[in-house]
Amino acid sequence: MNRARIGVIGLGRFGVQHARVLAQLPHVELTAVCSRSAERAGSVAAEYNVPNHYTEYRDLIRDPDVDAIDIVTEVDRHTEIALAALRLRKHVFSEILLTDSLDENDRLIDEAEESGAVFMVGFLERFDVRRANIKQKIDAGELGELVSIYGRRNIWRGILDAPRFKPYPLVIQPGIHTIDQLLWMAGEDVREVYARTRGMADPGRPDTWWAMLTFESGLVGVIEQSFFMPDRRLYWSNSGLEVVGTNGTAHIAEPNDAAWIWTGEATSSPDLYLSPELHGRIVGALEQELTHFADCVIGHRNPAHGTLREARDALHVGLAIVESARTERAIHL
């Protein structure tokens, strides 16, 4: 196989972005797209010269010109679609959160192993060059023994009203990115979780999360998440990563000083890492992530990042955070 023939299922804002990136990759053929809206599917197919478009995901999966699927639907449909694809031995890329059930995750692991298909979960931040550089330095021992890791994510408050996030604890969806980031940097298992929450916008729904993770070595990880960035904002989130080691410290802050734009209406900091546009192409972490998936499909090899077992580890910790906050006690994993 010289090119990966991929179909995209789910054409919301991020799904269209995936389609755009896949259409520009030289070793990918974007052969099909699917949306429950026929008009949406047709317009995206026309824009990116996609030969086939569907309103039913099962029809796309059965398409003989599709080797792999890219699932960018609502989370509660991911497992159903992925299982259907695996049974037809199609390779699968799935945006996280993949599932909020450990049992479902285990079922996907079994099905993927039985089918022999490539399965990759979208841990986008692992393909951010800044975070990857920090991880490389950790693994090379340049920071010494790790002492603590801190991940912060204060996201735009509009997410609180987005229907796709309402069924899940926010620390898991969309917050599982931060959990995975700490697990990746630490490179070891968590043995204890202690968490607290507050619900400010809606007293019945926690929108502020603090969690302390104790790893097997004694390394401490801290997660801070809230959802109160205002509509008139410089950037979509106020996020950060800090890694402290005995020989050095690494730090990322967003927004950062890489670029600022002032106009008569607002001041903004453009995205230069996750999915920026350069000369008419989407580049950055999203391009690198989907490139890696296509490479794995062509080479029929497991992904270096975003395995189903890594997804399970992140979910396991996320569910422990939810349980700790609910019961107001430490959870031992």
Image: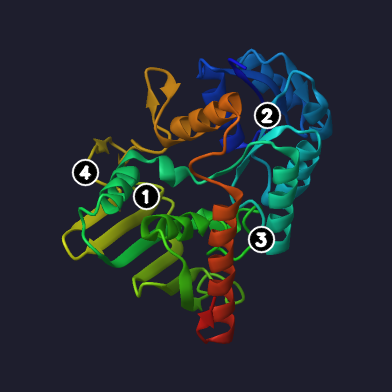
Which residue is painted at 68% across and 56% down in the image? 105
Secondary structure category for the residue under label 1:
loop
Query: Hey, what amino acid is under mark 2?
Result: Ala
Asked if disc 1 and disc 2 are in contact, CB closer than 8 Å, the reply is no
What is the quadrant of the C terminus in the image? bottom right
Query: Hey, what amino acid is under mark 4?
Result: Asp
Circle nearer the viewer, 4 or 3: 3
Q: CA distance from mark 2 to mark 4?
A: 39 Å
Q: Identify the image quadrant of residue 133.
A: top left
Q: Is residue 205 left or right of residue 107?
A: left
Sequence-wise, the earlier of marks 4 and 3 is 3
Secondary structure category for the residue under label 2:
strand
Is 145 above or below relative to 295? below
Secondary structure category for the residue under label 4:
loop
Q: CA distance from mark 3 to mark 2?
A: 23 Å
Q: Is residue 36 at least partly visible in the picture? A: yes
